[in-house]
Amino acid sequence: MGKPDDSFRQRAREYAVNLVLQGLLGAARALPYRWRVPLMGRLTARVVSPIAGYSQRVRTNLNYVLPDLPEREIRRLERAAPDNAGRTMIELYSAREFKARARNAPVSGPGLATARAAAEAGKPVIFVSGHFGSFNAGRVALVAQGFEMGVFYRPMSNRYFNRHYVRAMATLSEPMFEQGRRGTREMVQHLRRGGALGVLTDINAHDGIPLDFFGKPALSSLNMAELALKFDAPLVPFWGIRAANGIDFEVTVESPIPHTDAVTMTQAVNDRLEAQVRAHMDQWFWIHRRWKDGTGPVAEMRLRQWRERT
């Protein structure tokens, strides 16, 4: 028999992983909500994370940006960060119960009035956040505040998991705009109509340039700042901060980023997120390879391209 090609192997691997994850999610959903959320957090932290290498990635990231962090705190975050990720995942697949809690979350902060005034005037609003606390809780709470919250997202690398993941995301709010030409075009049309947009900005963005995050260069996309300038839209950071009980939230809407230039504005977004992470270290997704291409050939190429363009 011939050796299976890489495409077949990759598809088989993704299919198997999706089956396992669907099984875990299905089993968890059989439990009452107040039990399933902490259970999924615990399973992710103590079973999935060590097997998948997430615990080591948390440690690697912390050693890179916070080399003086005590070992005891590193060990705590090796468990706490995946725990929050597991809770966030099962919340997404528990739309009815999650939305009931999130839409009643207290919403405060100086940016709320600014965003509401822009929306009432028919202007678009760009809400930016990160893989911190629960982006989805903030999103649901802002929809309850009257914002037509579209979401720009990057599809999951596992094609089988992505199919039901996107459907689950869409149950919280629509429209959804997938990263790519078509999604970008639809997103721009949404903004032209005065819609609100929610975006996670803390990814290793291959279309971005290296900007500071926790004192280290991280590829950061300028797209949201450029759109804010183009459409004269407020660029508003917001955070769904998980409460001490682990299943409720408080939503903070910060003052808009001042309109200057795209680089300065994007760096300000990074700085705002960093401040929140430092205040709630266990609520950020330390599993991310956030600094993967902050230095090296990709970063140098993107920086050179940006300089040539400007």
Image (cartoon, rainbow, N blue to C red):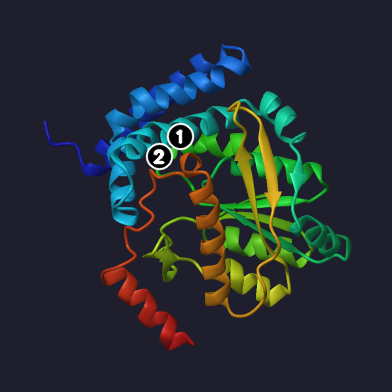
Dot 2: element? loop
Left/right of residue 152 with respect to residue 99 in the rendered view: left
Check the image and report above or below for 29 versus 77. above
User: How would you rate the neighbour count of disc 2 (Cα within 10 Å): few for under 14, some for 14-19, many for 20 or more?
Assistant: some
The one nearer the camera, 64 or 103, is 64
Q: Position of residue 157 (x, y in %)?
A: 40, 44
Split into 4 quadrants, where in the image is the N terminus? top left
Q: CA distance from mark 1 to mark 2?
A: 5 Å
Q: Position of residue 183 (x, y in %)?
A: 59, 58
Check the image and report above or below for 113 versus 86. below
The one nearer the camera, 267 or 121, is 267
Point out which mark residue 40 bears.
none
User: How would you rate the neighbour count of disc 1 (Cα within 10 Å): few for under 14, some for 14-19, many for 20 or more?
Assistant: some
Left/right of residue 287 with respect to residue 113 in the rendered view: left
Amino acid type of the residue that numbered disc 1 sits on in the rendered structure: Phe
Residue that appears at 68% across and 39% down: 250
Dot 1: element? helix
Residue with the mark numbered 1: 161
Point out which mark residue 158 bears.
2
The one nearer the camera, 80 or 262, is 80
Q: Are marks 1 and 2 in contact (CB under 8 Å)?
A: yes
Residue that appears at 67% across and 73% down: 258
Left/right of residue 297 with respect to residue 241 in the rendered view: left
Q: Is residue 65 visible?
A: yes
Check the image and report above or below for 37 versus 134. above
Amino acid type of the residue that numbered disc 2 sits on in the rendered structure: Asn
